[in-house]
Amino acid sequence: NNCFISKLSPGSVINPHKGLTSDCIRIHLGLVCDPDCKITIGNESRSWEEGKLLAFKYDDQNIFGVKHEGTFDRIILSLDLSISYLQKYVSNNL
């Protein structure tokens, strides 16, 4: 559905918000990661890791935001996929 590269500089904040649909999963691939840049989804916070995926439901129920308290840019590849599309190819329920 959507794909982009996101660069976030130290001191940046992405205010908590929701997705626009109930049928989407967002997948992040860490390219350049600062451990002090964290995404909070609901009550859980995580930082990205280079070369690893971080995925979550990007829907109209989950609230998420990002706070960068580190010292260098965080760069990720972000990909949004339709859950109903993925279910055609993945045996697990998403």
Image (spheres, rainbow, N blue to C red):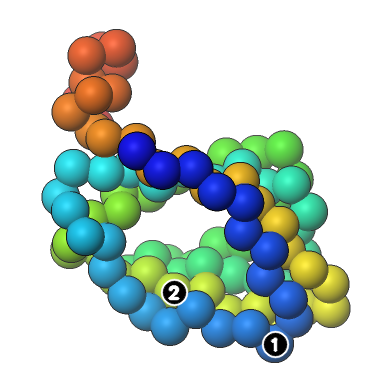
Marks 2 & 1, CB-CB < 8 Å contact = no
Q: Disc 1 marks which residue? A: 11
Res. 43 visible in picture = no
Q: Residue at x 31, y 53 (%)?
A: 58
Is residue 38 toward the left or the right of residue 55 in the image? right
Task: Categorize mark 1 by other alpha carbons within 10 Å: few (<14), some (14-19), many (20+).
Answer: few
Q: Give residue 3's position: percent from left, percent from top.
A: 49, 43
Q: Nearer the viewer, residue 81 or 30?
A: 81
Q: Residue at x 30, y 49 (%)?
A: 57
- Residue 28's tag is none
User: In the image, what residue type sits under mark 1?
Assistant: Gly
* SS at circle 2: strand
Q: Residue at x 75, y 81 (%)?
A: 10
Is residue 14 toward the left or the right of residue 50 in the image? left
- Residue 65's tag is 2
Q: Give residue 83's position: percent from left, percent from top.
A: 23, 33
The C terminus lies in which quarter of the figure? top left
Considering only vertical position in the picture, is 52 above or below 44? Answer: above
Q: Residue furthest bottom?
A: 11
Considering only vertical position in the picture, is 67 above or below 29? Answer: below
Task: Categorize mark 2 by other alpha carbons within 10 Å: few (<14), some (14-19), many (20+).
Answer: some
* SS at circle 1: loop
User: In the image, what residue type sits under mark 2?
Assistant: Gly
Q: Nearer the viewer, residue 41 or 43?
A: 41
Count of numbered marks: 2
Res. 88 visible in picture = yes
Q: Which of the two labelled residues, at mark 2 and mark 1, occupies the earlier sequence position?
A: 1
The N terminus lies in which quarter of the figure? top left
